[in-house]
Image (spheres, helix red, strand yellow):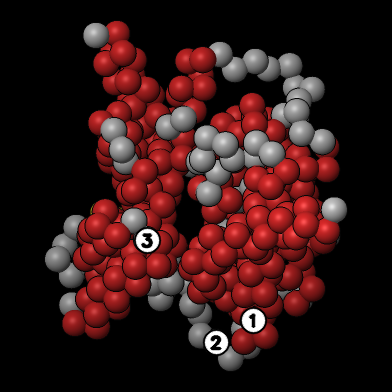
Amino acid sequence: MTLMTISLLAVITFTTRYLFLEGKLPLRLGPNVKQLLSFSAPAVLTAIFVPILFIHEQQLDISPTNAYLWGGVAAIIAAYKTHSVYWTIGVGTSVFLVGGTFL
Amino acid sequence: MFNRRKALLAAASKGALDMLPLSLAVLPWGILFGSLAIQRGFSWIEAQLFSAIIFGGAVQIVTVELMAEDTPLLTVLFSALVISSRHFLYGLTLREKLRAKPLRWRVGLGFLLTDELFSLSGDRRAYANRYRLYYALGAGGSFYLAWNVWTAAGIVAGAWLPDLTNLGLDFAIAATFIALVIPDIKSLPILVCVLVSAILSIVFSIYNLELGLVLAALIGMLAGFGLQKLRQAQ
């Protein structure tokens, strides 16, 4: 039963990833849709990381003791200045850990 | 012939190298998932199978919790569909680049199309030729390997680890996505798109809206697109 459920879950995730890569799907994307979709990467990735920083136990946490916010601000500054994934994760996580210890 | 194979291999290695920080950033999550599955009573084969054939992040953690609570099958499947629905956007975005490629490339890269691989697909010439395809295969394939090795580590350590679900391990994921989004904000419409998505993702999370992530992203996209159209019209 568990294996069955896991297999069905695999079918679902694969379908969501593959569906629109299928050429036979009768679907033409006009220039406007393409232009709209050019915003998908920043939009989706933002909608994933922002709640990690702000929401804890389904509550908005904008208090100065929220180490996620300090780490997030540090990561944003590092990303803006260095354009480097390593520096961003390094600086962000350091500030997050230090904040978590002292706040 | 030999040189060409070498060049393809070099392209795949470059992909794996570019993916490396992201592969490392999900280490805590992979360990979290592996140990969580064991602690919730799954066998090690089942736990590993989640990562081997479902190959998702949040979707695995949520469905393991649901299945452990004996949630009805349809509810489990529907939750998975909701969490995975953002992938429809990735497929749509990459459709023109991949639709005409041979089936094995579409199926292979489709299977590997995570948030992480999508975030490395922004280049205008991504997937355009064999080298670019091998680059993506190296990036996506190495990420798949990493995710499964981290899961295995979590399975092995699971018996000794405390419950890790509330330890702040998700910060590394946030930092990675910050590193991918911020340098891409090169115009006012993209900035507006990001800000709208950010604010709405907070609001929808507070109200615990099931499709909040996708809705926040879609409205953010429309805001950026609208502004771009407005500026083009002027």
Q: Residue at horizontal 85%, vertical 53%?
A: B1
Image check: B110 left or right of B214?
Answer: right
Front residue of this view, candidates B153 and A38: A38
Disc 2 is placed on an element classified as loop
Query: What is the quadrant of the C terminus of chain B in the image?
Result: top left
Image check: B132 left or right of A68?
Answer: right
Q: Tell us which disc is closer to us: 3 or 1.
A: 3
At which x and y percent is residue A57? 35, 61
Q: Chain of mark 2?
A: B
- Confirm whether circles 2 and 3 share one chain: no
Q: Residue at horizontal 58%, vertical 71%?
A: B30
- Confirm whether circles 3 and 1 share one chain: no
Image check: B104 left or right of A37?
Answer: right
At which x and y percent is residue B132? 65, 45
Q: Tell us which disc is closer to us: 2 or 3.
A: 3
Amino acid type at image mark 3: Ser
Cβ atoms at labels 2 and 3 below 8 Å apart? no
The residue positioned farthest toward the bottom in the image shown: B160
Q: Tell us which disc is closer to us: 2 or 1.
A: 1
Q: Quadrant of residue A59?
A: bottom left
Residue wearing tag 3: A84
Residue wearing tag 2: B161
Q: Residue at horizontal 76%, vertical 39%?
A: B106
Categorize mark 2 by other alpha carbons within 10 Å: few (<14), some (14-19), many (20+): some
Q: Between disc 2 and disc 1, whose residue precedes?
A: 1
Residue wearing tag 1: B153
At which x and y percent is residue B17? 57, 64
